[in-house]
Image (cartoon, coloured by chain):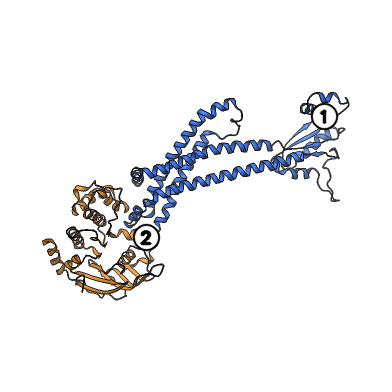
């Protein structure tokens, strides 16, 4: 518990960036900006409804809200798995809606992604799973040999390099997934319920890792149901409900 | 270096998904085997029907009193007609011998000694389907709107003969056989492609989550696709080699001993085995690889 308290203390010292979140004008300092974004799924379900927000460099944002509130829609928008029905999504100042399909992989290489169900490649060892993220961007063999053990040491899995995902516990799998997301040192890291399947103690370990990654300057967007974690970290919290932003608060908790 | 990576990736996938890959290879093997048996059969049947069709010819009977020079001239005239492949002159004596051969010895004993058959030209065509055109060229329509013989030494009555009944029968029968064979071959090839593509699709479908993850990590479409295409090539190669080996085995143990005793099996135009093997192998590999590549499209669209 001492470790998390320490993290929370440091977090409190981290002054949130100034800047209005609900302004639709382009904000050059923002890593992620949504301008009046609406997503309507085929069939009429509304994923997001006129959402505007701006997330600055190095910020740590929790997205909270009940199931179906639009958190996953938000993540999928940023990955450009989805395109908004209306409005614009800017990443590093560029409208990703205008990105030709061929450039989408390049966009994704600048983001790390972590999922509740880890999404590891089942046929690869821990080492190969992480190495794949580097092979995709055309990393050299030397580079891979150097970086992969390094990042796996960081997440505490140096002894499991040659295990397959199904031989690992949930917490370990999530750490592999974090290592894969972070091995390129992406400027933006998205985590969709990263502790959703994990017990509280394991979750603390994951949060500590996320904290370290945030400390290196990576912007973090974490969708979470985990009250404890959100309350403990005291970071910016954006609450969604039925596709709308109902709260956007600095250094806040899970509930008002 | 990239190629090495892709090869290693495909090999890994083959090893770790052995069951679906083997199923795909077995499907390729079976369809290739069926095609490998069917193609030579079609080839042989086609060459036989062509042989029959080539027997079709036109006979032009010449007045018995025509001079050598006149006959020569008629020959040149015929040679200049379109679609005429070759002509053969049959003299009176040759005609007699031919008739004798056809009906047997004894009939000629009962005919008077001055009985004579007219000399004739036998015309072979480049394609038997053009028979009507050639016949028309032999008796072009004159100014009065009636057909006139191209040369006066051609016999006036029934001077141009093509054994009409026979010709029509041969033409329609062989045409039917050709159409049936072509349809069967087309259907079989289509079925093979669909079967192979479907098996590959199943084996890839089982791995669609893997593809999804690769995409999320930022892999380009071709980066994801190449290992699958190479895997398809390998699976196709495996199945194709198996089928060619079985075909070769069957040829050596069954067909070759038979063809020594039976002329039918060794039809002159049966396809060369080496050519057949290469064609089948390449087709198996190409179909499998393209099948893999196309199947992936669905999962790569996001």
Quarter residue B148 falls in:
top right
Image point (24%, 53%), residue name:
A173
Relative image position of residue B189 (x, y in whole percent)? 53, 45
Q: Is residue B242 left or right of residue A177?
A: right
Name above or below for residue A176 compared with residue B169.
Answer: below
Task: Label 1: state its secondary structure.
Answer: helix
Chain A tint in image: orange
Q: Which residue is mark 1?
A: B92
Nearer the viewer's eye, disc 2 or disc 1?
A: 1
Quadrant, the N terminus of chain A? bottom left
Q: Is residue A235 left or right of residue A106?
A: left
Label annotation for residue A103: 2
Relative image position of residue A241 (x, y in whole percent)? 29, 72
Q: Is residue B97 left or right of residue A195?
A: right
Q: Confirm whether circles 2 and 1 share one chain.
A: no
- Subunit that carries the residue with mark 2: A
Relative image position of residue A119 (x, y in whole percent)? 29, 55
- Subunit that carries the residue with mark 1: B
Quadrant, the C terminus of chain A? bottom left
Badges 2 and 1: C-beta atoms under 8 Å apart?
Answer: no
Q: Is residue A190 visible?
A: no
């Amino acid at each position: 518990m001492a470790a998390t308290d320490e993290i929370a203390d440091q977090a409190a010292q981290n002054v949130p960036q100034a800047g209005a979140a609900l302004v639709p004008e382009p904000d050059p300092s923002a890593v992620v900006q949504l301008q009046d974004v609406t997503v309507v799924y085929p069939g009429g379900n509304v994923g997001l409804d006129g959402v505007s927000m701006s997330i600055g460099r190095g910020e740590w944002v929790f997205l909270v809200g009940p199931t179906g509130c639009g958190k996953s829609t938000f993540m999928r928008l940023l990955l450009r798995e989805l395109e908004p029905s209306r409005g614009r999504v800017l990443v590093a100042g560029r409208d990703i809606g205008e990105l030709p399909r061929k450039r989408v992989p390049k966009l994704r290489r600048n983001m790390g992604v972590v999922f509740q169900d880890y999404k590891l490649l089942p046929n690869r060892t821990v080492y190969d799973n992480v190495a794949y993220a580097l092979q995709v961007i055309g990393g050299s063999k030397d580079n891979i040999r150097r970086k992969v053990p390094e990042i796996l040491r960081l997440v505490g899995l140096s002894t499991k390099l040659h295990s397959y995902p199904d031989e690992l516990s949930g917490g370990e799998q999530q750490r592999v997934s974090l290592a894969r997301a972070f091995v390129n040192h992406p400027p933006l890291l998205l985590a969709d319920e990263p502790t959703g399947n994990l017990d509280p103690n394991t979750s603390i370990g994951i949060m500590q890792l996320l904290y370290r990654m945030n400390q290196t300057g990576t912007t973090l967007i974490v969708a979470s149901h985990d009250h404890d974690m959100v309350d403990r970290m005291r970071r910016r919290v954006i609450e969604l409900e039925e596709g709308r932003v109902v709260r956007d608060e600095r250094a806040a908790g899970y509930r008002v | 270096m990239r190629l090495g990576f892709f090869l290693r990736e495909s090999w890994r996938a083959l090893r770790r998904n052995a069951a679906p890959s083997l199923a795909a290879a077995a499907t390729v093997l079976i369809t290739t085997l069926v095609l490998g048996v069917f193609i030579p059969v079609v080839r042989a049947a086609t060459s036989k029907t062509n042989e029959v069709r080539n027997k079709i010819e036109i006979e032009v009977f010449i007045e018995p009193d025509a001079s050598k020079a006149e006959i020569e001239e008629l020959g040149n005239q015929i040679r200049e007609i379109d679609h005429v492949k070759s002509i053969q002159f049959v003299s009176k004596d040759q005609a007699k011998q031919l008739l004798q051969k056809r009906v047997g010895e004894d009939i000629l004993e009962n005919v008077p000694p001055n009985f004579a058959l007219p000399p004739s030209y036998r015309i072979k065509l480049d394609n038997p389907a053009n028979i009507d055109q050639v016949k028309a060229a032999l008796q072009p329509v004159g100014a009065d709107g009636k057909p006139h013989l191209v040369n006066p030494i051609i016999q006036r009555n029934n001077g141009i003969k093509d054994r009409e009944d026979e010709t029509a029968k041969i033409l329609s029968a062989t045409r039917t056989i050709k159409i049936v064979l072509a349809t069967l071959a087309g259907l079989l090839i289509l079925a093979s492609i669909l079967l192979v593509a479907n098996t590959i699709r199943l084996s890839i479908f089982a791995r669609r989550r893997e593809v999804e993850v690769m995409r999320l990590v930022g892999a380009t479409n071709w980066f994801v696709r190449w290992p699958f295409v190479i895997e398809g090539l390998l699976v196709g190669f495996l199945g194709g080699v198996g089928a060619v080996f079985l075909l070769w085995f069957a040829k050596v143990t069954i067909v070759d001993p038979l063809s020594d005793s039976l002329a039918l099996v060794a039809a002159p135009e049966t396809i060369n085995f080496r050519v057949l093997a290469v064609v089948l192998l390449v087709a198996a590999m190409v179909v499998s690889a393209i099948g893999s590549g196309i199947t992936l499209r669905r999962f790569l669209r996001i």
